[in-house]
């Protein structure tokens, strides 16, 4: 596509070729990000509650993590007592 445009004497359609810098394309990107942020802030809270299964799994995960912490503390204490 670019080769066809250059043969006809047209400049490329890339932003750098039009302006000679990346200021305009990056400015457009920045503005689109601001619009996206504005739209995201208008969404409000998430409407759906987690299911019972998801709550049970997260509780089980927390219990497993606490058990791992307790075991690692016990191992550390045992190593320190041997020294």
Image (cartoon, rainbow, N blue to C red):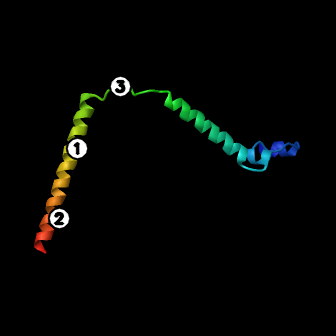
Quick one: which residue is furthest to the right in this view? Answer: 9
Q: Where is residue 40 in the image (x, y as percent from the top left)?
A: 51, 31
Q: Position of residue 72 (x, y in %)?
A: 18, 59
Q: Residue at x 32, y 27 (%)?
A: 49
Q: In which quarter of the image is residue 75?
A: bottom left
User: Going by the image, does 46 lie left or right of 81?
Assistant: right
Whichever of labels 3 and 1 marks the residue nearer the N terminus, that label is: 3
Give the residue at mark 1.
Answer: 62
Q: Residues within 10 Å of mark 2 (few under 14, many from 20)?
A: few
Dots 1, 2 in contact, CB < 8 A: no
User: Going by the image, does 73 lie left or right of 39?
Assistant: left
Give the residue at mark 3.
Answer: 48
User: Going by the image, does 46 lie left or right of 75?
Assistant: right
Whichever of labels 1 and 2 marks the residue nearer the N terminus, that label is: 1
Q: How crowded is mark 1: few (under 14 residues within 10 Å), some or many (20 or more)?
A: few
Q: Distance between the residues labelled 2 and 3?
A: 43 Å
What's the mark number on residue 12? none
Depicted 40 relative to depicted 13: above or below: above
Q: Distance between the residues labelled 3 and 1?
A: 22 Å
Q: 12 and 16: which one is in front? A: 16
Q: Position of residue 66 (x, y in %)?
A: 19, 49
Q: Residue at x 25, y 33 (%)?
A: 55
What's the mark number on residue 76? 2
Dots 2, 3 in contact, CB < 8 A: no
Q: Residues within 10 Å of mark 3 (few under 14, many from 20)?
A: few
Q: In which quarter of the image is residue 15?
A: top right
Whichever of labels 2 and 3 marks the residue nearer the N terminus, that label is: 3
Quarter containing the C terminus: bottom left
Depicted 65 relative to depicted 46: above or below: below
User: Going by the image, does 66 lie left or right of 28?
Assistant: left
Q: Residue at x 20, y 54 (%)?
A: 69
Q: 3 and 10: which one is in front? A: 10
């Amino acid at each position: 596509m670019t080769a066809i445009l250059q043969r006809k004497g047209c400049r490329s359609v890339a932003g750098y070729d039009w302006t000679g810098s990346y200021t305009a394309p990056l400015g457009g990107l920045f503005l689109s990000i601001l619009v996206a942020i504005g739209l995201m802030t208008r969404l409000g809270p998430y409407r759906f509650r987690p299911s019972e299964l998801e709550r049970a799994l997260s509780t089980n995960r927390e219990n497993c993590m606490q058990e791992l912490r307790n075991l690692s503390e016990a191992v550390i204490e045992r190593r320190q007592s041997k020294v």
